[in-house]
Image: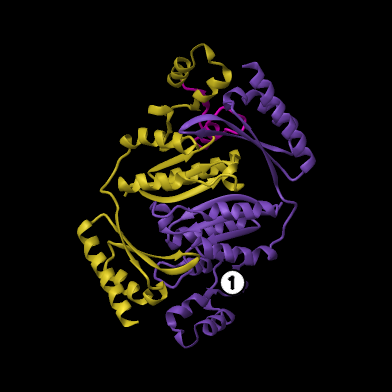
Chain colours: A purple, B yellow
Amino acid sequence: MITAAVLLIGDELLSGRTQDLNLNYIANKLVERGIVLQECRVVPDIEEMIVEAVKALSTKNTYVFTTGGIGSTHDDITQASIAKAFDKPLITHSEALKLLEEYYGSHINDTRRRMARAAEGAILHAKMVFQIENVFVMAGIPTVMQGMLEAILPVLNHEDPILSVTVKAYVFENDLADELTTLQATVPDVSIGSYPFDEEGHIKGTNLVARSRDAKKLAIVKDQLQALVDEKMRSF
Amino acid sequence: MITAAVLLIGDELLSGRTQDLNLNYIANKLVERGIVLQECRVVPDIEEMIVEAVKALSTKNTYVFTTGGIGSTHDDITQASIAKAFDKPLITHSEALKLLEEYYGSHINDTRRRMARAAEGAILHAKMVFQIENVFVMAGIPTVMQGMLEAILPVLNHEDPILSVTVKAYVFENDLADELTTLQATVPDVSIGSYPFDEEGHIKGTNLVARSRDAKKLAIVKDQLQALVDEKMRSF
């Protein structure tokens, strides 16, 4: 199983200033490639916390995707922190520096050169995405992050996509709980989730979501879920 | 310093099915009360991962707020996992059971009674929020979660609110980096962040955000940031 973790870096996500949109975007792209997103962490711009998270997540997963903290200002400490997590020196990456010099021309300066820094041994992908060991480093701004992710998706190993089907039911999950437990026990390869939904501020029903890599099994479970809901509706 | 962590529980957040809105909401409410949100984790409905996260976050923070996984279906394992994290048995909380029986009347059944389960010793707050040690357990649906949070905010210890000011500058952060580093060094009590913003898909400038509990210091830094931006604009 190919697994991944996302590490969102930035004070602004924990102060409430910024609503994160990156986790959801990355999650959808990984699902399409059959990569199982196992965990996400959000940490502030504090070296110790970034180091700890990178160590923990990179050990447990095939890939780690970070967002945020790669600009040139004093609070951009992602590259330095990742270098520290892997016990490597922070160096200026010559190929990245060359690209920055070409891009900025005569406007290049030391501040801009800082964006060419990464842990020793870092691999440079398109769109200036650095890869250090199994960690891919992306920007925090959604539009920029999305372009960077697009650039690295082709280099990732992938599996059959994880498919999902949804049965929307105007039935409370309490009234489906026993039947769902029974059904889930008979289909170990399909993961069934139950998500109450609200409309106009009140819980009105339940979305039943089944997920699997096996399209045939999923189609059968969808029919079983629909039958379960239909029967329950008739019984009211 | 009063600190907090948020733990978002649910497969749907990691599969890309659901865009989280709870972290940002909780973050804003905590900032108003001067509680420093240090970290957030998002984990799936897997007991081992919930247990590990609850242990780590509850040890390191004054408070932990969880969302998700408190319904009555097979995938709602939050209460059982928190009980395990604190090495306590999962019991039926008599006061919670009484409330459920009053609410459901003759419609009470074993499935609904499951929602009265929590770790032994759990404290029951208004809106059915359980507190186990320093962990507050809330629903995943935003509207429900918001009501639950409102119910427990009064019981939390709090400090002076963390204030923030923003200076919006149509200047790239590269062009402000050196001056910001210098300014930050002179004001250790104020945290200065630099956030590029985009308009119409392109990065157009930088939001400079200063945060502190000290309104007077913050006002001075705001003026300094504005002066810095004005000077930079004049120099172009």
Question: Position of B34 compared to A201: left or right?
Answer: left
Residue sitting farthest toward the top: B106
Q: Quadrant of residue A207?
A: top right
Q: Residue furthest left?
A: B216
Percent x, y for residue B23? 45, 46
**Which segment did they paint magenta?**
B70-93
Residue at 42% from the left image edge and 61% from the top image edge: A46
- Decide: is B158 above or below B98: below
Q: Position of residue A16 (x, y in %)?
A: 39, 51
* Res. B77 image quadrant: top right
Q: Residues within 10 Å of mark 1 (few under 14, many from 20)?
A: some
Task: Give amino acid for label 1.
Answer: Lys
Disc 1 target residue: A127
| Element class at badge 1 | helix
Say above or below: A70 vs A178. below
* Chain letter of disc 1 in the image: A
Residue A157 position, x and y percent, is: 72, 60
Rendered image quadrant of residue A223: top right
The percent position of residue B204, horizontal first and vertical second, equals 43, 69
The residue under the point 72% across, 38% down is A190
> Farthest residue in the front direction?
B200
Residue that protrudes farthest toward the bottom in the picture: A106
| Quadrant for the C terminus of chain B in the image | bottom left
